[in-house]
Image (cartoon, rainbow, N blue to C red):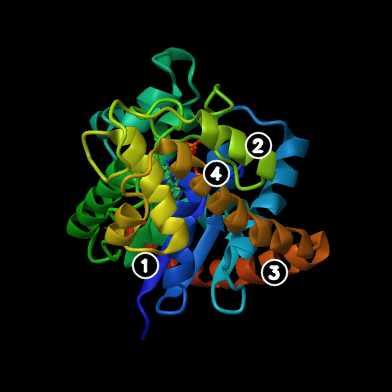
Amino acid sequence: MKKRIFSGAQPTGELHLGNYLGATKNWVELQNDYDSMFCIVDLHAITVPQDPLVLRRKTLDLARIYLAAGIDPDVSTVFVQSAVPAHAELAWALNCIAKMGELQRMTQFKDKSGGKSESASVGLFTYPVLMAADILLYQTDLVPVGQDQKQHLELTRDIAERFNRDYGETFVVPDPYILKAGAKILSLKDPSKKMSKSDPNENATIFLMDDPDTVMRKVRKAVTDSGTTVEFDENRPAINNLLTIYRMLTGKSEEDCVTEFEGRGYGEFKPALGETVVEFLRPFQERYKQFDDEELKNILKAGAEKARELARTTIDNTYKNLGLR
Ligand code: ATP
Ligand code: LTN
């Protein structure tokens, strides 16, 4: 039997190169070797206010992005979180297992609440517990995510282990799958931050739907460190980041990338990187346009049916072990 992977992204904002290189690219590469579930986590999205009409459209658009990136709905299960009530049912039970202190340590909550925890929703606070429910519901073995989700994965493991200890073996304890390359793609304007959907600086993030002129401009304006050589160097995060993007999109080895730009400066590297990104996005955006709404809705409907069936077994077992029902 194949091992299971589960991952998801929120249908908010636009997906960017960081999401692709840190997560989606790995999903595509793993999907044939694992029993794969890819979720559009709309219940996570509402932890901050959303316009309902926009959320509905973004949910379908994200399914389109998954498919354009290479997720094959005949191989993987693609579905929307809110179509499977068991996510919320398990989240409630796990809310009674997770500790306030554990959640208070979550750095994403601190970042996303912007230090104003009093006015953040309770949902935003307990967001990692819903994420744990997503993962544990499907007896997941491996969770491919970017570096920023590592802490949530550790919490998920702690919750699973505590539950298994106190109420009997119920959940598979999942492992994170975080590759070194691409796990944290940095902002093009401030390499001390990760590339993010919600960065106020419009040149900081390359979105998957950006047109060629926009991509070329963002790459041209990307900050560089002191020094002129084009090399992988942890101490020069800006060029390290740009070169990582180049390497991952071309599939070349580190050595080949360095040799290619030896003796050539940023002036030659940046246009080459820009072209590489444009040439990667072109076929991606073509594929994006191919899927119509009806086709997507059918794929999501079939995915949700399969997910509901799998989730039911875990919920029944969890509730029984807790003495419910
Ligand atoms: P953002 O911070 O951009 O708003 P998010 O974390 O809310 O993003 P999701 O769409 O839910 O966005 O994330 C999908 C996946 O992308 C997650 O696995 C996350 O770890 C990964 N990811 C997000 N940003 C980056 C990045 N800069 N580099 C690598 N992976 C990333
Ligand atoms: N928290 C993640 C999105 C997410 C997720 C998940 C990822 C929600 N549930 C389950 C992996 C597995 C984020 O903010 N990027």
Hey, which quadrant is residue 264 in on the image?
top left
Question: Would you name the residue on which mark 4 appears?
Answer: 16
- The CA span between labels 1 and 3 is 22 Å
Q: Residue furthest left?
A: 165
Q: Is residue 119 above or below residue 206?
A: above
Whether pointer 2 and pointer 1 mark residues with C-beta atoms closer than 8 Å, the reply is no
Of the numbered discs 2 and 1, the one sitting upstream in the chain is: 1
Of the numbered discs 1 and 3, the one sitting upstream in the chain is: 1
Q: Is residue 118 left or right of residue 55?
A: left
Question: Would you name the residue on which mark 3 appears?
Answer: 299
Q: Is residue 101 above or below residue 308?
A: above
Question: Would you name the residue on which mark 2 appears?
Answer: 214
Residue 98 seen by the camera: yes
Of residues 261 and 237, the one nearer the viewer is 261
- Assess mark 4: CB under 8 A from ligand 1? yes
Q: Amino acid at mark 4?
A: His
Identified at 41% across, 76% down, the residue is 34
Q: Amino acid at mark 2?
A: Thr
Q: Residue furthest bottom?
A: 1
Q: Secondary structure at mark 4?
A: loop
Q: Amino acid at mark 1?
A: Gln
Of the numbered discs 2 and 4, the one sitting upstream in the chain is: 4
Question: Would you name the residue on which mark 1 appears?
Answer: 139
Residue 88 spot, x, y in % from top left: 51, 48
- The CA span between labels 3 and 2 is 32 Å
Of residues 192 and 171, the one nearer the viewer is 192
- The CA span between labels 2 and 1 is 42 Å
Q: Secondary structure at mark 3?
A: helix
Of the numbered discs 3 and 4, the one sitting upstream in the chain is: 4
In front: label 1 or label 3: 3
